[in-house]
Image: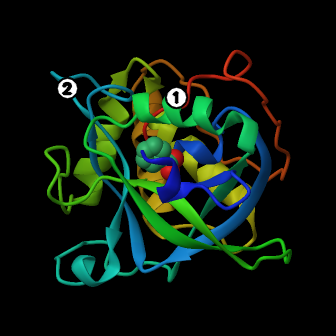
Amino acid sequence: MAADETTSETGEFWIFGYGSLIWKPPPHYDQRVPGWVTGYVRRFWQASQDHRGTPEAPGRVVTLIERSFWASLADAHDSAPDKVWGTAYRIRADRVAEVKAYLDIREINGYTIHHAPFHRADGRSPPTIRTLVYIGTPDNDQFTGPQDPQALAEHIYASEGPSGLNRDYLLGLERALDELSPESGDAHVTDLSDRVRAIESRGRREGGPAAEGFERHPASHEFRKVGSVDEQEETEKA
Ligand code: BEZ
């Protein structure tokens, strides 16, 4: 990642997170701003071999699909919000090299670096910020394309990788989106979460073990800021 592609004149850079970065921030950020990008659709159409699945049994994580391309596909979730909500983080100038090195290490499993104008929701200036964003484009090997929602929910329910259960990622994303703003929910994410909760309660009724984290949560708007690599859980792809 060349410095001149992403950094501003003052040396800092901004990264937009629409997946796990929303609740697992990168190290050394000094601003966290909720907001959105447009022109994309968020979908659980990226296979994860390294975080929420394994090479033998990949899980599913989110990527962004260009809206015009998505519109040409047959998706059972046939509508999507105009705004893809997420969080932008500003990395201060004296930490840029360190954080870029850290993020570059993580640029694997099909994601590549893109840039998108981010619209901040906090009313501060500037209203639009150029952000770096990781996207698994349709030409990458991990891109799955459209998925049947029930089959996708069953797949997420059954998957697990080094970063934990795939369903915790899904439910964590639903919760993080709910906490961003009253309008930041994503029906694709909520529908999959509802299906996963139904699978879980069906399992419980049939005598399976109760799993944690399956109650619908109240949005709290609380966020714990983490300042260093050591203090935080590892940032994971998507
Ligand atoms: C994210 O936006 O959270 C993200 C997306 C792809 C790769 C890494 C993080």
- Residue 227 lies, in percent from the top left, at 79, 29
Would you say the residues marked 2 and 1 are in contact, meaning their CB atoms lie under 8 Å apart?
no
Asked whether residue 17 is in view, the answer is no
**In the displayed structure, would residue 89 be above or below residue 53?**
below
Asked which quadrant contains residue 125, the reply is bottom right
Q: Amino acid at mark 1?
A: Tyr
Q: Quadrant of the C terminus?
A: top left
- Residue 138 lies, in percent from the top left, at 19, 60
Q: Is residue 81 left or right of residue 118?
A: left
Asked which quadrant contains residue 40, the reply is bottom left
Residue 102, labelled with which disc? 1
Q: Is residue 198 left or right of residue 95?
A: left
**In the displayed structure, would residue 72 be above or below residue 92?**
below
- Residue 117 lies, in percent from the top left, at 55, 74
Q: Secondary structure at mark 2?
A: loop
- Say few, some or many: other residues with alpha carbon within 10 Å of mark 2 (under 14 / 14 to 19 / 20 or more): some
